[in-house]
Image (tube, helix red, strand yellow):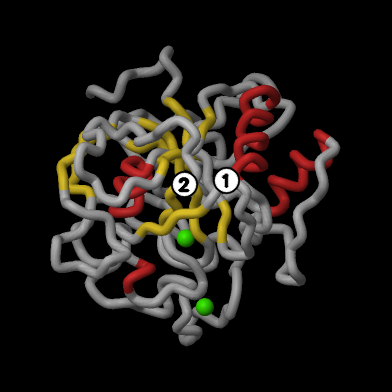
Amino acid sequence: MRCAVGTVCLSALLLAGCGGGNETEEAAVSGPEMIDVAAGSFIMGAPEDADSQQGKPQHEVSVPAFRLAKTQVTFEQYDAFAKATGRPRPQDDGLGRADRPVINIDRSDMLAYIAWLNETSGESGYRLPSEAEWEYAARAGTTTNFYWGDEPDPDLANTRTNGGRDSFELTSPVMTFPANPWGFYDMAGNVWDMTEDCLFPDYVDAPTDGSARTKPDCDRFVLRGGDYSSSRRGQKPTARVATGPMFRSTSMSFRVAQDIPQTEDSGVE
Ligand SMILES: [Ca+2]
Ligand SMILES: [Ca+2]
């Protein structure tokens, strides 16, 4: 089953072939389950009076249609890559593997996984998401403090609260908490997501076409989406931190984005 561009596959579990395109021939490697995100515009960033962790200033961004994985890359997915390529399996620090987000890898490991997907999955165009794409997908059309409303809720994200559904001091399996309105999991809390963007101190002169803001020899890349130790501010879809390219952590992972294949509908319906 192919999901029409211009819609979001909310019932992703039922649409096992969504974005996969593997009905007629078995791909050698199955990539992460992708959700089609329709093109659209949104206000990126936080108001001037927001705390210092939030990206500012607010500005309108028009995002072309793209795909984003509904979860972060799991240990199961990454370990298949490591096995196939002879790379070491990253440590899990005793937190468990399987459907936990892969941790203790650096940016070059993430890019190697993505390159491997492009080479072996039978599909192309896999890449890291831009900050703008990430925030557009995290907000999922909402304008509230969090994608579920204006107050933190321990039943809706793995953060430092550790109450209610959040019984996790550290990482939690992907899809433990409810998805956001567009079907993406863990866009608040659990572990941070790597993006394509280099860190600039603010959004002045940032691109407004959904593309990543980069520069040669970047030494600080932007992470989005908070982690298991996030306070109120770290859970917001506008929160951002940054790390160097060699950084590894139990609180950082990644999810893949993908270009919409050129042969498909452009998203105009
Ligand atoms: Ca927690
Ligand atoms: Ca997260």
Q: Which residue is mark 2?
A: 221
Can you tell me whether the CB of the residue at mark 1 lies under 8 Å from the nearest atom of ligand 2?
Answer: no
Secondary structure at numbered mark 2: strand
Q: Kindly identify which residue carries mark 1.
A: 245
> Looking at this rendering, what residue extends furthest in the bottom direction?
163
In the image, taking residue 135 as reference, residue 45 lies left or right, namely: left
Q: Which x, y percent locates residue 77?
A: 69, 46
Residue 182 in the image: x percent, y percent?
35, 50
Task: Tell me the kind of residue under disc 1.
Answer: Pro
Find residue 113 and name its label.
Answer: none
Q: Residue at x 29, y 58 (%)?
A: 238
Q: Helix, strand, or loop for circle 1?
A: loop
Q: On the rendered structure, is 87 left or right of 41? A: right
Q: Amino acid at mark 2?
A: Phe
Quarter holding the C terminus is: top left
Q: Position of residue 64 (x, y in %)?
A: 29, 29
